[in-house]
Image: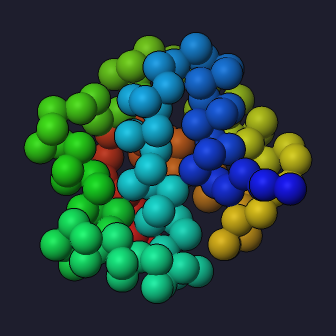
Amino acid sequence: AVEMSLHHKLCHVLGGSFDLPHAETHAIVLPHAIAYNAAAAPDAMTRIARALDTPNAALGLYDLARRLQLPSGLSDIGMPESGIERAADIAVQNPYANPRPVDRASVRDLIARAYRGDPPLLQ
């Protein structure tokens, strides 16, 4: 069976709960999810960073999206600020495979940063 990791789970929750556009949601959330999981998946982060010719995979993806002029925050694609708490609650309801353990406070912070369009928080 295939299981959902944090990135896919968050995009599923956000898209389904707030009717957000699929591709844009993934592009906004990916750098944040990668930053969250970076310490638990160092080999993958090294490969991604090398492919982007950047020292940090998460920031490299974030910067790439800015250069492509993609929406920078979930607020830009229609998510209400009040949805941050709801999304965090839903995202931690059912356990799922992820390289790093997932807790509500961390997920809430990740969603809030993605909502605002902040750079990913390097852990």
Residue 109 vertical placement versus 19 (above, below): below
- Please count the marks in the image: 0
Question: 25 or 92: which is nearer to us?
Answer: 25
Q: Is residue 99 visible?
A: yes
Residue at image x 51%, y 56%?
33
Task: Return the x and y of residue 92 as percentages of the image width and height.
Answer: 79, 48
Task: From this view, report whether residue 64 is shown above or below residue 12.
Answer: below
Taking the spot 27% from the left edge, 52% from the top edge, the residue there is 62
Q: Is residue 57 left or right of residue 35?
A: left
Q: Residue at x 32, y 46 (%)?
A: 118
Q: Is residue 2 left or right of residue 26?
A: right
User: The N terminus lies in which quarter of the figure?
Assistant: bottom right
Along the viewing direction, whichever of 114 and 31 lies nearer the viewer: 31
In the picture as drawn, the residue positioned furthest to the front comes out as 1
Question: Which residue lies most toward the left here?
Answer: 67
Q: Position of residue 61 (x, y in %)?
A: 29, 56
Answer with the quarter of the image where residue 90 lies. Answer: top right
- Residue nearest the viewer, comparing 92 with 69: 69
Residue ID at (11%, 43%) = 67
